[in-house]
Image (tube, coloured by chain):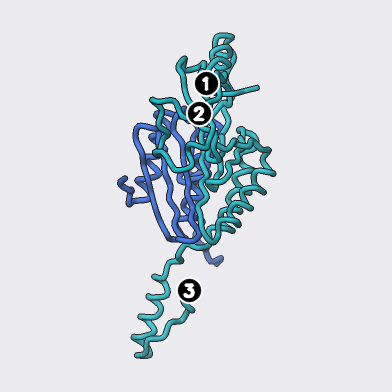
Chain colours: A blue, B cyan
Amino acid sequence: MVYIVSWDEFVDRSVQLFRADPESTRYVVKYRHCDGKLVLKVTDNKECLKFKTDQAQEAKKMEKLNNIFFTLMARGPDVDLSEVTGKEPMETQPTKKGRGRKQ
Amino acid sequence: DDTFLKISIIKIMHRPPNKFSPPGGFRRADHQIPYLLCDSREKKSLQCLRICKEYSSEVLLQLDPFLNELTSMFEKSKEKGSVWVTLKRSSLKSKLQKRKLSSAGESIEYRCLIRATDAKKTISTSVGAKDHQRFQASYATILKAHMTALKKRERKDRKKSTEAEKKQGTSTTTKPKKL
């Protein structure tokens, strides 16, 4: 089984796979404490995407992916993910005005 | 009783029927395990199920008991073993029920089915649109607390140590390395 190297590619393709077939796509996480290994798998029983790591920082990224999948699966594949990923903020912050000296 | 596959048992056999071979091959103890020959109604074919400890039943729990059991699974699997957690979208209804609902014009409510196993037992729970955020938070806490064997990034340590080398000319690390 070929593992995907890029995290972002794994996330994009997984979400795509789920949206294409929400009925049969599943997301599996396997953790082995004795080996310190974490393996993620997303499959629709036709195609399989896998990602493995032994890094703690990838576990933090996995948490975000967990949130994405919880939202997609509980609410539906058509859910707008911008709230979950935080990539597109709803409102842009107002620009700070430069400090002008009162004269 | 909601079952995905309706099975009616035809007879109990003490040896596997001739054309049957269990997935993964025969093992020594196989002749001691009773076999059930059954008619699976959904698939309309004869299937043979082997009763053995691998075919343990999956326990469907409420959210909080599930989280507690998941925690104990992680704790038990520290020295050896793995913990698998699977997320899948499901309506928890059989094909027949789905057909009835869609023909009646009612929308099928989907939930997120979460399964956890440590190869000895399997637990599961389902989370709906209303409770998924609360569950997500507790679930993340459990994972963070238990996935501690993963390596921490040492780039920052190396960077600091190389900078220190340039300044001091000695190879000392500023942060203690994790074992």
Question: Which mark is on residue B49?
Answer: 2
Q: Quadrant of residue A75?
A: top right
Packing grade of label 3 (10 A; few <14, some 14-19, many >=20) is few
**Location of residue B125 in the rendering, given as x and y in whole percent from the top left corner:** 62, 37
Mark 3 or mark 2: whose residue is earlier in sequence: 2
Mark 3 and mark 2 on one chain: yes
Amino acid type, label 1: Cys
> Which amino acid, by three-letter code, is at mark 2?
Leu
Query: Which residue corresponds to the image point at 60% horizontal and 51% vertical from the top-left?
Result: B73
Q: Chain of mark 3?
A: B
With A81 as the anchor, is A12 left or right in this view? left
Dot 1: few (<14), some (14–19), or many (≥20) neighbours within 10 Å?
some
> Residue at label 3?
B179
Q: What is the spatial separation of the Cα atoms under label 3 and label 2, in whole angstroms? A: 47 Å
Q: State yes or no: discs 1 and 2 in contact (Cβ < 8 Å).
A: yes
> Which element type, helix, strand or loop, lies under badge 3?
loop
Q: Which residue is mark 1?
A: B38
Secondary structure under badge 1?
Answer: strand
Where does residue A31 sit, x and y in percent of width and height?
Answer: 49, 53
Against A72, is A87 above or below? below
